[in-house]
Image (cartoon, rainbow, N blue to C red):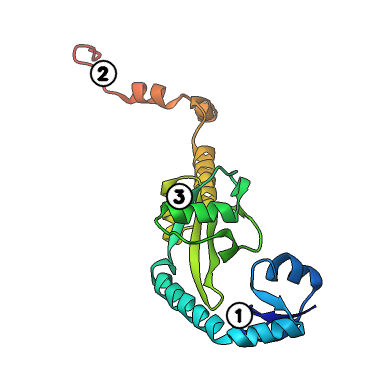
Amino acid sequence: MEIILLERIEKLGGIGDVVTVKNGFARNFLLPNNKALRANEANRKLFEANRSKIEADNAERRTDAEGRAKDIDGKQVVLIRQASNTGQLYGSVSVRDIVDALVEDGVTGVTKSMVELERPIKALGLVDVKVKLHPEVAVTVGVNVARSPDEAEMQKQGIDVIAAMFEEEQAEAVATALEPDSEDEFEDVGAAPSELAAEEAPAADGEEEA
C-alpha cells in the first residue's frame, strides 16, 4: 500500500514522503495512529494544503521532547524480581513494568508505544532500553533487574552478582572440604590431639615422682 507519512518513521522516511508498506502495517499501525495517510489524490491535496501546519506542529513536539530528554536520558530504574540461582526470572519484565517504574521514579508522559523492547527481559542484570519521546528524539533508560536492593546496587557498580555468588559458593565448598570431619582423622597416627596434649602437659605440683 502507498502511504503519505505524517511524521518521521525509522527506516521508512520523513514527513511528506510517499512510501510503500505492507497492508497490515499500514492498516494496523500507521493509519489508526495518524502517522500516515493513504496516498490517493484527495489525501495528497489535503496533505499539501496542511503541510506547513503539520511541520510546525511536529517541530513543536520535537522541541518539547528534546527538553524532556535531558532529564530522562541515562536514568536507571530498579525492578526487584524473584529469580533462580542461575539468574533466570520467575516470570519476565515487560514494557508495562518499565513504564510503571518510570512513573514511580517521577517520569511522566512515557507510554508503552514509546518503549522499544525487542523481547521481554527474563534474566537478572542491566539492560539498556530505547525510549522514543518523539519520532526524531530517542533516549536510553537503564533497567536494573535484581533480587534485592543490595544486588541492584552491586549491579549498578558493574558487579556480576551471579558470578560473584558462584565464586562464593565455590570458596565455601573448598573450605568445607579442607575442614577435618572429626578427630577420627588422627587415628592413623596414634592418639587424638586432645590426648596428646594431656600426655605432654607437665605434672601438677605434688604429683611429681619421688
In the current view of this chain or complex, which residue is farthest to the left? 205
Q: Quadrant of residue 40?
A: bottom right
Rounded to the nearest angstrom, the CA distance separating label 2 from label 3 is 58 Å
For the residue pair 94 and 30, the one nearer the viewer reads as: 30
The x, y position of residue 46, in whole percent, is 66, 83
The x, y position of residue 66, in whole percent, is 43, 76
Residue visible at 53% across and 65% down in the picture: 128
Q: Earlier in the sequence, mark 2 or mark 3?
A: 3
Q: Which mark is residue 206?
A: none
Q: How many marks?
A: 3
Give the quadrant of the N terminus.
bottom right
Taking the image as shown, residue 12 lies to the left or right of residue 194, namely right
**Residue type highlighted by circle 1:** Arg
Taking the image as shown, residue 40 lies to the left or right of residue 160, namely right
Q: Earlier in the sequence, mark 3 or mark 1?
A: 1
Residue visible at 70% across and 77% down in the picture: 37
Residue visible at 30% across and 23% down in the picture: 201
For the residue pair 77 and 4, the one nearer the viewer reads as: 4
- Label 3: how many residues lie within 10 Å, few (<14), some (14-19) or many (20+)? many
- Of discs 2 and 3, which sits in the foreground? 3
Residue at the disc numbered 1: 8
**Residue type highlighted by circle 3:** Glu
Q: Assess whether mark 1 and mark 2 are in contact (beta carbons under 8 angstroms).
A: no
Residue at the disc numbered 2: 203
Q: In terms of secondary structure, where does tag 3 sit?
A: helix
Q: Earlier in the sequence, mark 2 or mark 1?
A: 1
The x, y position of residue 184, in whole percent, is 53, 25
Q: Quadrant of residue 50?
A: bottom right
Q: Which mark is residue 151?
A: 3
